[in-house]
Image: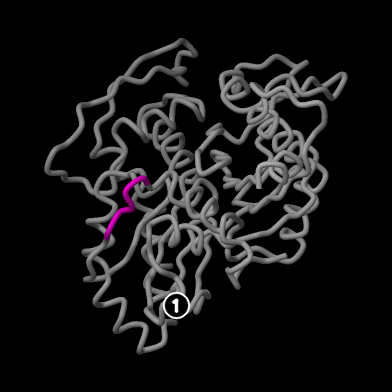
Amino acid sequence: MGLFDFFTQEIAIDLGTANTLVIHNDKVVVDEPSIVAIDRASGKVIAVGKKAMQMHGKTHEEIKTVRPLKDGVIADFQAAEYMIRGMIKMINNNKKRYFNPSLKMVICIPSGITEVEKRAVKDSAEHAGGKEVYLIHEPMAAAIGIGIDVLEPMGNMIIDIGGGTSEIAVIALGGIVCDKSIRVAGDDFTNDIVDYMRRQHNLLIGERSAEKIKIEVGSALPELDNPPEDYAIQGRDLMTGTPKEIKVSYTEIAHALDKSITKIEAAILNALEMTPPELSADIYRTGLYLAGGGSLLRGLDKRISQKTKLPVHVAEDPLRAVARGTGIALKNSAKLPFLIR
């Protein structure tokens, strides 16, 4: 296996709208924001990942920052290829190699993706050096990452709230029985916060600042048992045009996010309606599983539980559940029937 490994490199990629994770040898070796900084004149890539994220919203006209994925699918084909190449380079940074090994990749994709969008992911991966490219649906990868035996004749409902899409799927016997994919997720929460700050406080803030508010005081419920402290945020006053600082509370953010969370709740109820009765009985016993960065929002599990009257379990490390599952699928790629060639 050692000699074969020298010629072939196996990597699993969780290609997300907000973050991209790469797993190699069962370890998360790359965890970077899905963003690329490009020089407009030459078209060269200046930075990928965290370095590009630091430039986001602060560039001059010679540099542009591009987020290649929108709503979980590739929106900018070339930028996506640059990003995948850049992330693969990060794996091999410390290794001296006289040639580039051929790459075997497993990439996860949203369950509601079209054939054209699927083709774009495969083409980007192949252009970035992938010789063997497999695809796996995100809810399936999340279920494997959580530790559920997906091949059992037992129904489990997975809710994966990422950056661009929320995937809700019922899984049994190694397949997706019914699924609902909606393009309302973490990015919409961020936009809701930007809109709310502009409407309520006449304060214009950027995407990165809204993301910080979401992490520090984001909440799905207006009343929490252990609430976070108010968070100070700086932006531009729309009345005077000067920089200004205000404090925001978690209750305000809960009101700002209410509309988007209601859409996710409606999608969950819709998916439960489509579930066959025998699987509904299983889900009543096992409850719902939450994964993805969106599930870290305070009180979201409680709110979904109140709405569905079912127990809700949040994955141990929800941000990496999909990536972990993709890594396990890579190791067992010969045995798993649900990997897409």
- Compared with residue 227, is residue 289 higher up or lower down, i.e. above or below? below
**Which secondary structure class fits the magenta region best?**
loop
Residue bounds of the magenta highlight? 313-317
Residues 330 and 302: in front is 330
- Using residue 150 as the reference point, say whether residue 310 is left or right of it: left
- Using residue 151 as the reference point, say whether residue 84 is left or right of it: right
Circle 1 residue: 172
Q: Residue at x 38, y 65 (%)?
A: 148
Q: Quadrant of residue 96?
A: top right
Residue 265 image point, x, y percent = 36, 63
Q: Residue at x 57, y 45 (%)?
A: 16
Neighbours of disc 1 within 10 Å: few (<14), some (14-19), many (20+): many
Q: How is the image coloured?
A: one colour
290 in magenta: no
Residues 150 and 33: in front is 150
Q: Residue at x 60, y 65 (%)?
A: 112
Residue 128 image point, x, y percent = 78, 40
Q: Amino acid at mark 1?
A: Ala
- The residue lying furthest to the top in this view is 242
- Compared with residue 29, is residue 63 higher up or lower down, i.e. above or below? above
- Compared with residue 269, is residue 54 higher up or lower down, i.e. above or below? above
Quadrant location of the C terminus in the rendered image:
bottom right
- The residue lying furthest to the left in this view is 225
Q: Quadrant of residue 114?
A: bottom right
Q: Residue at x 76, y 34 (%)?
A: 82
314 in magenta: yes
- The residue lying furthest to the bottom in this view is 277
- Using residue 266 as the reference point, say whether residue 281 is left or right of it: left
Residue 230 image point, x, y percent = 23, 26
